Amino acid sequence: MKAVDMAAKVITDNSFSWIDNLYLDFIPEDDLKAEDQAGNNVTDCLITGVDNSPTTWGNDSFSELLKAVEIQLFYSLNFSSDTDQCEVALMKAFLAAGWSIQRQDESQDPDTGQAIKTIYVSKLQNILGGS
């Protein structure tokens, strides 16, 4: 299973009500245009893959893949919840699902003014016996 699909399952299984749209790999151009015209009043989550490297080497082979994704949260301009609480709940859900938190970044979109949070998570997947 692709890392973005695995990460999306963590988010959908936890039903985060503050995430309005979940996108895998990219945000469609039509959605971006529609949101800009509507005033960026939704919170989007974009998951992209950043690593799928073989690891745990032995006998000239490997038995695990390091799966890593970048989770970008594009907060609505009128977001009223505590972003720290939302992000902690998201990270705890990933930890509970066996993922590791690698790092986080914060920025602001210079065009829209939206706050952006980027969280990098990774997980080792055993390829010999399944997940």
Image (spheres, rainbow, N blue to C red):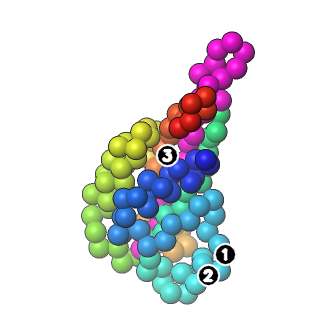
Q: Earlier in the sequence, mark 3 or mark 1?
A: 1
Question: Disc 1 marks which residue?
Answer: 29
* Label total for image: 3
Q: Earlier in the sequence, mark 2 or mark 3?
A: 2
The Cα atoms of the two marked residues, 1 and 2, are separated by: 6 Å
Q: Quadrant of residue 14?
A: bottom left
The Cα atoms of the two marked residues, 2 and 3, are separated by: 27 Å
The Cα atoms of the two marked residues, 3 and 1, are separated by: 24 Å
**Residue type for callout 3:** Tyr
Queried whether the magenta region covers residue 56, the answer comes back as yes
**Residue type for callout 2:** Lys
Please, what is the dominant secondary structure of the magenta stretch?
A: strand
Queried whether the magenta region covers residue 120, the answer comes back as no
Question: Residue 87: x percent and y percent?
Answer: 35, 55
Q: Nearer the viewer, residue 78 or 14?
A: 14
**Residue type for callout 1:** Glu
In the image, residue 120 above or below residue 11: above
What range of the chain is rendered magenta? 54-76
In the image, residue 87 above or below residue 33: above
Q: Quadrant of residue 127?
A: top right
Question: Disc 2 marks which residue?
Answer: 33
At 48% from the left and 79% from the top, the residue drawn is: 40
Residues at badges 1 and 2 in contact (C-beta under 8 Å)? yes
Question: Residue 63: x percent and y percent?
Answer: 62, 25
Question: Disc 3 marks which residue?
Answer: 120
Q: Is residue 7 left or right of residue 78?
A: right
